[in-house]
Image (tube, rainbow, N blue to C red):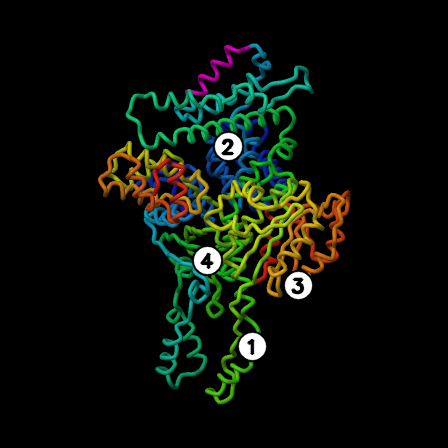
């Protein structure tokens, strides 16, 4: 059942930190459980809090291989699971003139002509694998039915070949932006993890780690301002990635402390709507923008 | 399950019973948790052990929850079933005269808030409830009240002290210091919540967990009855508008896509078949007209149903790009258009209710709602707003204060519009009681009960035209 990547929650925290991903206790615990129970991990949360990054960090920490299925509207079986290589099959039939139908048939539906797509690749992989199903909410509902078999039992049925069962279970991460409500059936098969905005202290550590040249006091101020913006009623509140962008901007501008002018000029890095900027400037007591 | 541990209650009662009790309490709150998930939760607890309470919390959350919205209820129920501490038997703490003890406690709370020490704040919350939250004396009449503890400790009055402690460290003033007051307010609110949790825990010890878990834990915001929701809950609901609108937009887009499939365009199919010798190899589907429907919202904004109307108006406004045109009208006993007040961007949803009442003429000689007059005025003044492509939503409880309901006005609107839906925040059992004329209107238009935000989301996804 287990993937056997990690032995304890503390080890998860340490090894993820070694790859540059600072995990909150909630993230570390849930990753450990997903590994231990061998269940897929469904990660939800606002954009830019590091959902995809988590899968990459786990891959790196475990020394595994990353197989990624990017979902989009209209992604189908042939893109997600497997496809027969028709052109090659035709070529094989033309090349083997004179052989009997049975021979040709058994031959063209063999492994050689099977094009593995991400889900099948992850299941057949013999080395440690992390399967990332990214932006699951973008895919159509029909694909979820497909995922149910794959994620419930870690097996895939190819009519011509039979059922292929995973040799070793891939560590599976599904991410969702909650654009569409995922079905209950899919949720039941997964461990659920919501990554929200990090606590102030953790975010300060993240900023310090990602933007090494930044002064510690400035990093603290940056995180406090972002925290205040998140408490406002804005159309799009800044996420962790925007905090990091802002910190990088400040570093590039050579600002060593925040003042009204710097904040006013760089607010566009944090906020993406003009009315948000106006409202935030008002609440932060900046002069007219 | 193996291993007990430092968590005191788990050892005394058996972790399995505690887990099943927790699951039962969550099911009472409407969580769909299957046996398989309960087993997973047990395995997860075993995997993380019982030493660290926060890990246990996350382990159970990961296995039992299906969405972030369930989290607040889960946290409160978890605190009841896996409490951080068990009260040592003791007296009822300080009497009312203990002013010195109170002052000392307040000083320590201020210091802890300034330092942001979570563990210490938990202990102080426990002390606050133990010292100042007890009431009654004999068994059966005594208990613990967070309200009483908070009204004596009054953490909100510590703001100045905490600010002084945070800024008095001698460093130069920083830009972020202008945020200090808000930060402290949030910290104080966090402390108040700790006190509430502690009071619930103590009451649960005395009266039995299961009962407290059912009663004292509030339901999730989207299940709160519109008519019973307090100001805080309405604020919380408003924060859910944008995610909800995005979800509805996706659902509407899916419906639109599905509606676009289907009907075969015979003429173009035959035309296309000429190139394949008259065999219609590729059927051509009929193209839908891209015209998007128009929406008219007609809302009763009088006191009793104002929360419901405002939430719906903000929600519909957030969905405005789904329609070619959205017009919003509000009424109490007169009717006025408020579309302009709602324009996206300019609208600050929090002050929206006040702006409607200030900016629109909604009341005549008296301030009570009068559906008959308002509907008649709408039918007369804004007849051009309703046409064959318009879907009208009427929002209100149809309590017309014993005035003439004038059904002919509603009939007129129903005849002109493509469809009229009436969303009533009251349950059907109350329709027709007292001054409600709901049954009369329900004969003319499609009336549905809509008591909470979840139901509203479902109805909108189904009823909105595509």
Name the foreground residue: B106 vs A152. B106
Say whether mark 3 and mark 4 are on the same chain.
no
Residue extending furthest toward the front: B365
In the rendered image, residue B456, in percent from the top left (x then y), is placed at 61, 50
Say whether mark 2 and mark 1 are on the same chain.
yes
Say whether mark 1 and mark 3 are on the same chain.
yes
Whether residue A97 is visible to the viewer of this picture, yes or no, is yes
Name the foreground residue: A218 vs A24. A218
Magenta span dominant secondary structure: helix
| Residue position for label 2 | B3
Pointers 4 and 3 in contact (C-beta within 8 Å): no
Residue A136 as seen in the image, left or right of residue A57: right
Q: Establish if B123 lies above or below B444.
A: above
Q: Which numbered marker is on residue A138?
A: 4
Q: In which quarter of the image is residue A12?
A: top left
Camera-side mark, 3 or 1: 3
Quote the CA–CA distance across marks 2 and 4: 43 Å
Quote the CA–CA distance across marks 4 and 3: 39 Å
Pointers 2 and 4 in contact (C-beta within 8 Å): no
Camera-side mark, 2 or 3: 3
Q: Establish if A108 lies above or below A253.
A: below
Q: Is mark 3 on a helix, strand or loop?
A: helix
Residue B267 as seen in the image, left or right of residue A11: right
The quadrant of the rendering that contains the C terminus of chain B is bottom right
| Residue position for label 3 | B416
2 or 3: tag closer to the N-terminus: 2
Q: What stretch is highlighted in magenta?
A: B98-111
């Amino acid at each position: 059942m287990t993937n056997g990547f990690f032995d304890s929650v503390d080890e998860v925290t340490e090894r993820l930190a070694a790859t540059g991903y600072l995990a909150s206790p909630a993230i570390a615990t849930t990753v450990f459980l997903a590994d231990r129970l061998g269940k897929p991990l469904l990660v939800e949360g606002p954009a830019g809090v590091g959902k995809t990054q988590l899968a990459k960090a786990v891959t790196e920490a475990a020394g595994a291989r990353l197989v990624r299925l990017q979902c989009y509207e209209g992604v189908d079986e042939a893109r997600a699971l497997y496809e027969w290589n028709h052109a090659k099959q035709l070529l094989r039939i033309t090349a083997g003139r004179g052989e009997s139908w049975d021979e040709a048939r058994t031959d063209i539906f063999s492994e050689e002509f099977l094009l593995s797509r991400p889900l099948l690749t992850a299941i057949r992989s013999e080395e440690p694998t992390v399967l990332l199903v990214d932006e699951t909410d973008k895919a159509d509902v029909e694909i979820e039915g497909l995922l149910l078999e794959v994620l419930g039992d870690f097996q895939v049925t190819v009519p011509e070949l039979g059922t292929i069962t995973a040799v070793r279970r891939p560590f599976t991460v599904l991410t969702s932006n909650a654009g569409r409500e995922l079905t209950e059936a899919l949720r039941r098969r997964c461990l659920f993890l919501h990554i929200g905005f990090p606590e102030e202290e953790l975010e300060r550590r993240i900023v310090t780690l990602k933007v090494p040249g930044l002064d510690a006091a400035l990093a603290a101020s940056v995180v406090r301002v972002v925290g205040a913006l998140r408490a406002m009623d804005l159309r799009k509140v800044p996420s962790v990635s925007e905090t990091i962008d802002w910190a990088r901007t400040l570093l590039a501008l050579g600002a060593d402390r925040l003042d009204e002018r710097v904040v006013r000029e760089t607010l566009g890095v944090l906020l993406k709507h003009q009315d948000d900027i106006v409202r935030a400037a008002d609440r932060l007591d900046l002069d007219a923008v | 399950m193996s291993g007990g541990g430092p968590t005191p209650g788990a050892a005394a009662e058996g972790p399995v019973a505690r887990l099943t009790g927790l699951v039962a309490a969550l099911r009472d709150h409407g969580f769909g948790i299957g046996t398989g998930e309960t087993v997973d939760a047990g395995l997860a607890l075993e995997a993380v052990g019982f030493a660290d309470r926060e890990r246990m919390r996350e382990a159970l959350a990961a296995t039992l929850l299906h969405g972030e919205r369930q989290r607040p209820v889960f946290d409160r129920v978890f605190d009841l079933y896996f409490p951080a501490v068990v009260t040592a038997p003791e007296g009822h703490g300080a009497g009312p005269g203990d002013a010195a003890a109170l002052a000392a406690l307040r000083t320590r709370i201020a210091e802890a808030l300034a330092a942001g020490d979570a563990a210490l704040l938990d202990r102080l919350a426990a002390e606050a409830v133990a010292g100042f939250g007890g009431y009654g004396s004999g068994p059966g009449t005594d208990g613990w009240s967070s309200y009483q503890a908070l009204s004596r400790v009054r953490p909100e009055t510590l703001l100045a002290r905490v600010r002084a402690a945070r800024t008095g460290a001698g460093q130069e003033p920083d830009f972020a210091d202008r945020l200090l007051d808000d930060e402290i307010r949030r910290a104080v609110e966090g402390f108040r919540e700790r006190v509430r949790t502690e009071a619930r825990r103590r009451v649960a010890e005395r009266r039995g967990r299961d009962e407290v878990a059912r009663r004292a834990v509030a339901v999730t915001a989207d299940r709160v009855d519109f008519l019973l929701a307090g100001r805080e809950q309405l604020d919380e609901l408003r924060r859910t508008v944008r995610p909800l609108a995005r979800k509805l937009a996706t659902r509407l887009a899916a419906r639109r896509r599905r509606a676009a499939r289907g009907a075969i365009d015979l003429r173009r199919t035959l035309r296309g078949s000429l190139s394949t010798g008259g065999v219609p190899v590729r059927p051509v589907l009929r193209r839908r007209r891209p015209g998007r429907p128009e929406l008219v919202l007609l809302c009763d904004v009088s006191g009793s149903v104002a929360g419901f109307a405002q939430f719906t108006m903000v929600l519909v406004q957030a969905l405005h790009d789904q329609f070619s045109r959205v017009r919003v009208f509000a009424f109490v006993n007169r009717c006025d258009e408020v579309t302009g007040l709602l324009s996206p961007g300019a609208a600050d949803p929090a002050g929206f209710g006040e702006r409607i009442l200030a900016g629109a003429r909604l009341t005549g000689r008296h301030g009570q709602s009068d559906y008959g007059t308002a509907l008649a005025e709408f039918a007369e003044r804004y007849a051009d707003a309703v046409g064959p492509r318009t879907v009208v939503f009427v929002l209100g409880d149809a309590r017309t204060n014993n005035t003439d309901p004038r059904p002919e006005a509603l009939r007129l609107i129903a005849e002109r519009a493509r469809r009229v839906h009436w969303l009533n925040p009251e349950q059907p059992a109350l329709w027709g009681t007292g001054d409600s004329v709901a049954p009369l209107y329900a004969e003319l238009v499609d009336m549905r009960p809509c008591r909470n935000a979840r139901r509203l989301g479902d109805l909108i996804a189904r009823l909105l035209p595509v």
